Amino acid sequence: MPSGSYSGDSMIIPVGDDRRIEFVTHEVQVQRKSIAQSNTKTQKKGDVNWIPYKFCSTIGGAIRCLEHEMYATSDAEGVEACMKEVQRVLDKLSTAIKPRFEIREVA
């Protein structure tokens, strides 16, 4: 999984291939990946857009939103399957937010 990135005014934490958490001024957004289906004035077919759909005040709130969404959209049935799903969701989220440090040389 790719590490998070920082672009000066926001920080991004990828959570899987189609979701991410972005820190923007005064809020934390949960975003969904969207791929343009046709050409428009501002984008070409196939361009990737990130659409915010949850707005939280803390990283904890954003993680809880994603966690609840992942449980709600799961197909797991029965106690054993649900427990495995809980473990899968927690592993995915903990991997996404695990601190990663990269030292870059400044030119």
Image (cartoon, helix red, strand yellow):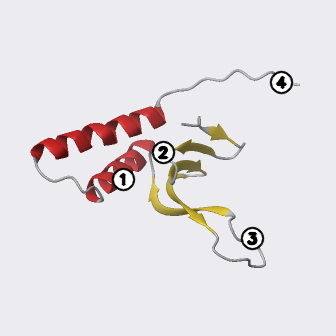
Q: Nearer the viewer, mark 3 or mark 2?
A: 3
Q: Label 2 belongs to which residue?
A: 15
Q: Which residue is mark 3?
A: 44
Name the residue: 17% across, 45% down. Answer: 81
Mark 4 residue element: loop
| Number of numbered markers | 4
Picture residue at 47% right of the left edge, 29% below the top = 98
Which label's residue is closer to the chain start, 4 or 1? 1
Q: Earlier in the sequence, mark 3 or mark 1?
A: 3
Residue drawn at x 36%, y 53% is 65
Rendered view: 92 above or below 48: above
Residue 97 in the image: above or below residue 20: above
Q: Residue furthest left?
A: 79
Q: Which residue is mark 4?
A: 106
Q: Amino acid at mark 1?
A: Cys
Q: What separation in Å lies between label 4 and label 3 (alpha carbons)?
A: 34 Å
Q: Amino acid at mark 2?
A: Val
The reply to whether discs 4 and 1 touch (Cβ–Cβ < 8 Å) is no
Give the numbered dot on residue 65.
1
Q: Is residue 75 above or below residue 105?
A: below
Q: Say which label, 3 or 2, has the lower sequence index.
A: 2
Q: Earlier in the sequence, mark 4 or mark 3?
A: 3
> CA separation, marks 4 and 1?
37 Å
Q: Is residue 14 left or right of residue 87?
A: right
